[in-house]
Amino acid sequence: MKKCIFYLVFLSIVSVVFLGCENNSHKKQKTKEQNTPIVAQFNADSAFNYIQRQVDFGPRVPGSAAHDKTAIYLERKLSKFCDTAFTQYGTVENHLNQQIPIKNIIGSFNLSQKKRVLLCAHWDTRPMADQDKERPTEPSDGANDGASGVGVLIEVARQFQKQRPDAGVDIVFFDAEDMGDSQGAANTWCLGSQHWSKTPHVKNYVARFGILLDMVGPSNAVFAIEGNSWMYAQPYVKKVWNTANKLGHGQYFVNYQGGQLVDDHLFINQIIGIPTLDIIHYDVSQNTGFGDFWHTHKDNMETIDKKTLKAVGETVCQVVMDL
């Protein structure tokens, strides 16, 4: 009997020690997994195709048939990848005192999560290619100026469906960004983001910070640190640029000031108070800063470089996954 008791006790001790070792090993493995940074995925080919699809509809000028068709396409894409998606309808007045119907298209992840981040881009095209020497009154394809940021964010949404972030994410495609008076006041631009900032899709909407993507497709793009981004969202500018450098994209995210620009982020900062930065191609060595394709008919799919899309998309995905 004593031998049997000793044997059972021995087995119990061995079992406890074994289970203890197993639990400790599991805890160490879990801790190691928790401390291992998640490497976000991004498919530049997919993003490129989303840009091409928008361009195929034609110039997305508010009020046009191409604009209406693109709106349906964009909402369907966000509905497919996000937890929820819908269109925010509104009416704004442009600098010609015309009433313009607009459509801000919104998709969200993790609706119950209070820690949120705003990702945005504009999806409309300018009614005229006013910098073009040959056809200044006709709208361009807007592959870079409009479609590029949207294409990147659709792919970001697709990746977040597969590898969900912990934070809540709201993706907003702003309308009527590019209808402004080139000789007029700043508030003649970015009409969709002004409307959303005054009447957000959720009452008392709050996000920790926002990232705006605009003209993020050119070859050898230069994303200088935009002045209003630095003024309103300096800690998050540092976070984005540091992340880009860690991922090996430092040749795109350069460490110099690019001047203060009027873009959707300006009104998000000023009206709703969400610190928002702008990732936008702006090269101070160029005449306009935006490239010779800006507001011309050269703004077509030939301007879009998958390497640039990858640099921007990977950076944005990683910043959100690290939250």
Image: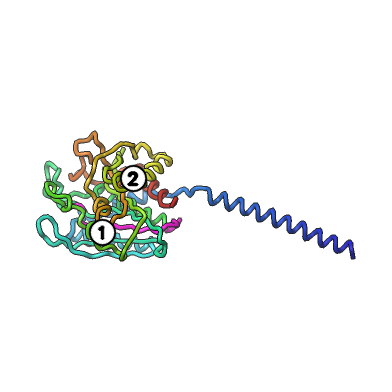
Residue at 31 percent of width and 38 percent of height: 220
Residue at 58 percent of width and 53 percent of height: 30
Image quarter (top left, top right, bottom left or bottom right) of the N terminus: bottom right
Residue type at mark 1 is: Ser
When the figure is inspected, residue 247 is found, relative to residue 57, above or below; the finding is above
Secondary element under disc 2, as helix, strand or loop, is helix
Residue at 29 percent of width and 64 percent of height: 201
When the figure is inspected, residue 287 is found, relative to residue 12, above or below; the finding is above
**Stretch in magenta:** 161-179
Total number of numbered discs in the rendering = 2
Q: Reading the chain from its start, which is encountered first: label 2 or label 1?
A: 1
Residue 120 position by quadrant? bottom left
Residue type at mark 2 is: Gln
Residue 186 horizontal side relative to residue 245, left or right: left
Q: Nearer the viewer, residue 240 or 303?
A: 240
Is residue 49 visible in this depiction of the protein?
A: no
Q: Position of residue 39 (x, y in %)?
A: 46, 48
Residue 84 horizontal side relative to residue 8, left or right: left
Asked if labels 1 and 2 touch by Cβ distance under 8 angstroms, the answer is no
Query: Is residue 168 part of the magenta span, yes or no?
Result: yes
Query: Is residue 49 part of the magenta span, yes or no?
Result: no
Furthest residue in direction left, as rendered: 96
Q: Please give the residue where the numbered disc 1 appears in the rendered image.
A: 197
Residue at 25 percent of width and 50 percent of height: 266
Q: Nearer the viewer, mark 2 or mark 1?
A: 2
Q: Please give the residue where the numbered disc 2 appears in the rendered image.
A: 234
